[in-house]
Amino acid sequence: AQKVTQAQTEISVVEKEDVTLDCVYETRDTTYYLFWYKQPPSGELVFLIRRNSFDEQNEISGRYSWNFQKSTSSFNFTITASQVVDSAVYFCALSEADYGGSQGNLIFGKGTKLSVKP
Amino acid sequence: GAVVSQHPSRVICKSGTSVKIECRSLDFQATTMFWYRQFPKQSLMLMATSNEGSKATYEQGVEKDKFLINHASLTLSTLTVTSAHPEDSSFYICSARATGGFTEAFFGQGTRLTVV
């Protein structure tokens, strides 16, 4: 069965601190996709990244970076020099790939609520 | 990315009434749509998957007679919450996926339903 675990329920940091959000996943599939979404209080899901299981390269996008390690089934997300606007709930998610390689439904972790204080 | 429009964004209804939520793919043909539900301070859970022209497949524990899903066209899927009760108050969000290989799914903005 597929499962996503975000062990950190809530994290509170002071502005400009770096923060890492952990994500551990379980799947028996060899082809799958991993995601991170940001959910501000408005509720809308903001897409941050999608990574397929064959691409273990780490990625950096501005202050955001992601560390994908298949050996430990982890897909951690780091925000460098955090800002108040980063305050939100962050979800890690997993999706299997169908026979055509398309993304299936998402299995979400429970989310990590990040509070960045000025 | 592709655009998925969900309407309404917020709705308040009286207990016992029905509410329809629309999910539209604006710039692609969505052969598959996923409907998720999120209770306050909880994660998102898949309710059902619908393919255009077919009956929806519901997840275990989701009442298909209560949550009616229609996916009659390649750009529109609807979720109707019938005889809504306060425990149905939740955030409902759809996701649409096109046909073809290596396609991804895109989320709508979500609908916050409050049943009073």
Image (cartoon, helix red, strand yellow):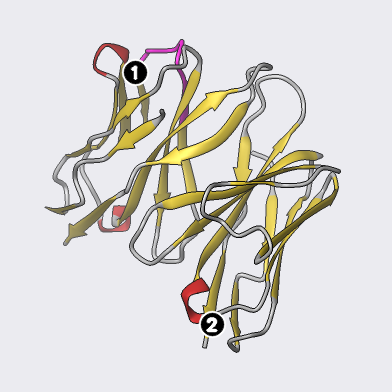
Q: CA distance from mark 1 to mark 2?
A: 44 Å
Q: In the image, residue A96 lies at what x, y percent?
A: 52, 25
Chain at tag 2: B
The answer to which image quadrant residue A22 occupies is top left
Between residues A80 and A29, which one lies in front from this camera angle? Answer: A29
Q: In the image, residue A29 lies at what x, y percent?
A: 47, 16
Mark 2 neighbour density, 10 Å: few (under 14) some (14–19) many (20 or more): many
Residue denoted by label 1? A58
The answer to which image quadrant residue A8 occupies is top left
Measuring 56% from the left and 56% from the top, which residue is drawn there? B62
Between residues A72 and A39, which one lies in front from this camera angle? Answer: A72
Disc 1 to disc 2: CB gap under 8 Å: no
Amino acid type at image mark 2: Val
Chain at tag 1: A
Disc 1 on helix, strand or loop? loop
Q: Is residue A11 left or right of residue A24?
A: left
Q: Is residue A56 located in the magenta-colored stretch of the structure?
A: yes
Dot label at residue A89: none
Residue denoted by label 2? B115
